[in-house]
Image: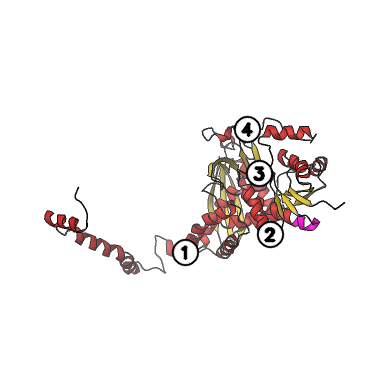
Amino acid sequence: MPAKNKVVLAYSGGLDTSIIIPWLKENHGLEVHALAGDVGQGDEELAGLEKKALATGAASCKVVDLRREFLSDYVWPCLRALTVYEGRYLLGTSMARPILAKAQVEHARAIGATHVAHGCTGKGNDQVRFELTYMALAPDLKLVAPWREWDIRSREDAIDYANSRKIPITASRTKIYSRDRNLWHISHEGGALEDPANAPPEDVWVLTTSPEKAPDRAETVELEFEAGVPVGLGGKRLAPEALLAKLNELGGRHGVGRVDITENRLVGMKSRGVYETPGGAILIEALRTLRSLCLDRDTQRQCEKLMPEYADLVYTGRWFAPLRESLDAFFAHATRHVTGTVQVKLYKGSATALSARSPWSLYSEDLATFGHSASFEHKDSYGFVRLYGLPGMVAASVARKNDRRPAAPKSTRAKLLATSGGRKK
């Protein structure tokens, strides 16, 4: 009997991916190998995952630790570019999907699989993020996307399918929120959040204290950066995971990093998402301040112009696109001197930079002072201002000249209208 073709399933252990395992076997005759990537979901979500997948019918299940790679190769490049989608969203889920799909492809190669599969619905962005990664890294692998094929249309349908096949699940028919967590953030959707008119209930929040209940005394943290990447906290060099974990703890205690946004999904609909990114919010504030100290005006403004394009590439799943990689090279070069320390005050939901120091600082107190400057001559400004304002002065002069020109007689205006084919109204 010929061996079955193998499929590597992006596996989380939730309701959808649990029922996908037997569904792939029944409907495609595939041998299912589950792969879960650890990007910082936490022990609660990862505990017992292998046992659960095997009990559901998987031929194997592997959990691969992606945490260091996730921060170093995905999160830090986005941070270096100060990447924010639509002014609010710090792209926590968007950055995680490509590395999970990449791990899937690598596992498929290792075990000789012919297919890859995911549990994303047709409404969301994640299907695009997974599939564009497959297409970039392994276009020969065949794709199975169950939500586009099966008859399951609701959570109740999925639970009935699981019960009919004795699939062990912990899901109930009432699911309050849909959450996605990693080292960078946690997102919340669904339930009361589906109506943007509803304020997020207090039971939504997981990482952050309510600003009203946060400590009454502010706390100041000092962050160290090298070439636009965080490397230290409070005078100590820390590994990426430890640094971000500590910032999440500190920011969460002070209610920092809450975002409530109705964003534009790639598929065309608007979606309300509530995000908690305490450590990320602190890092963005600190790095923005340090960058303003170290970048010349033209480079800083070009970074600001290119950031929305970079954010859009990440949000829409084009992580491995040539343009994203080219822009990343630009940001890496542009920020190569963004090195130094920044102090940030945490207080009642806010993170505010207080001071910044850098050996590459472009700030000159002698030039900027309102007092006597040894290297600046005020008289030099006369010619500069005259030349800088020359185009506007010429335009204003011409406008004044034309405004003084007498109006044409009515008969002449009528002739002009008749000649041009116009009609006087």
**Decide: marks 2, 3 in contact (CB < 8 A)?**
no
Check disc 1 and give the amino acid type: Asp
- What's the distance in space between the residues labelled 3 and 4, CA to CA? 33 Å
Provide the residue designation for mark 3. Answer: 148
* Viewer-closest of 64 and 153: 153
Distance CA(mark 1)–CA(mark 2): 36 Å
**Is 254 located above or below residue 356 in the figure?**
above
Q: Work out how far the residue at label 1 is from the one at label 4, CA to CA, in angstroms.
A: 45 Å
Question: Residue 63, position in %: x, y?
Answer: 77, 49
Image location of residue 56, percent across then percent down: 80, 40
Q: Amino acid at mark 2?
A: Leu
Task: Tell me the residue at 71%/58% (across/down).
Answer: 140
Side of 129 relative to 116 (left or right): left
Q: Is residue 33 above or below residue 157?
A: below
The mark nearer the N terminus, 4 or 2, is 2
- Mark 4 residue element: helix
- Label whose residue precedes the other's in the sequence (3 or 1): 3
**Nearer-the-camera pick, 101 or 200:** 101
Question: Badge 4 is on which residue?
Answer: 203
Binning the other alpha carbons within 10 Å of mark 1 as few (below 14), some (14 to 19) or many (20 upward) gives few
Q: Amino acid at mark 4?
A: Asp
Range drawn in magenta: 106-113
Q: Earlier in the sequence, mark 3 or mark 4?
A: 3
Horizontal and vertical percent for residue 60?
82, 48
Q: In the rendered structure, find residue 298 and report the number of the disc placed on it.
A: 1
Amino acid type for the residue under numbered disc 3: Arg
